[in-house]
Every structure is written in structure tokens, then in C-alpha cells.
Amino acid sequence: MVGSRISSGKATFWGWFFIAIGAICLPMFVFAAVVSKLLPPSDNPVMAAVQNDRYYYLLVPLTLPVLVVAVYFHWHSMKLFKHA
């Protein structure tokens, strides 16, 4: 089972990698969900598609309640497993 462990350097790399991906995705989502709606209509087809979007800009905020419930169930199942 020793071979299946991740080295400290590799785990650090993946940790920083996921933090960087999150740091890149957050401003893109904020732009798509908030800022693009405040800008005047654009002739660029990609920008026009982002401005006229009615699905994805609500998807992330509406998944937050589901995330809270999932985290609660995870915590609850770990408590049940720990005291079983």
C-alpha cells in the first residue's frame, strides 16, 4: 500500500493547480453572470451569446443550496460511520 501514496511534492502541486483553476474560473463566472449583463449589446457573437444567456448565470448560484445539503449529508454519514 506504500506505492499508492502520493508524494508531498505531487500533492502540493495538485493543490496549487486546483487553487489556480478556481482563481481563473471565478472571475470568468463573475464576468459572465454580472458584468456582461451591464455592458451595452455587442456585435461579437461570443459576447452576444454570453450577454443573452439565461441558464448558466443562474446555474452556479442555484447549486449552492444543493452543495450545503451534500456537505451536511457527508458530515452526517461520517459521524454515523465513526460511532458505528
Image (cartoon, rainbow, N blue to C red):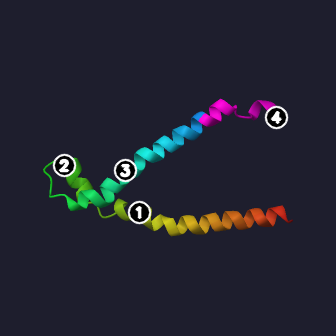
Q: Can you tell which quarter of the image residue 24 is in?
A: top left
The first of marks 4 and 1 along the sequence is 4
In the figure, is residue 13 to the left or right of 39? right
Using the numbered discs, state the Cα–Cα distance from disc 3 to disc 2 in whole angstroms. 21 Å
Label placed on residue 34? none
Task: Give the quarter of the figure containing the N terminus.
Answer: top right
Where disc 3 sits, the SS reads: helix
| Residue under numbered circle 2 | 45
Residue at 43 percent of width and 61 percent of height? 60
Range of magenta residues: 1-12
> Could you tell me which secondary element the residue under label 2 belongs to?
helix
The residue carrying mark 1 is: 59
Dominant SS of magenta comes to helix
At 61% from the left and 65% from the top, the residue drawn is 70
Crowd class of label 2 (few under 14; some 14 to 19; many from 20; radius 10 Å): few
- Eye-nearest disc, 4 or 3: 3
Which kind of residue does numbered mark 1 sit on? Leu
Return the residue at label 4.
1
Residue linked to disc 3: 27
In percent of width and height, residue 8 lies at 68, 33
Residue 7 is drawn in which quadrant? top right
Could you tell which of marks 3 and 1 lies nearer the N-terminus?
3
Name which residue type carries label 2.
Pro
5 is within the stretch colored magenta: yes
Q: Is residue 77 magenta?
A: no
Distance of mark 3 from mark 1, alpha carbons?
Answer: 16 Å
- Which of the two labelled residues, at mark 3 and mark 2, occupies the earlier sequence position? 3
Q: Is residue 11 above or below residue 31?
A: above
Q: Position of residue 80 (x, y in %)?
A: 79, 67
Identify the residue at image location x=68%, y=63%.
74
CA separation, marks 4 and 2? 53 Å
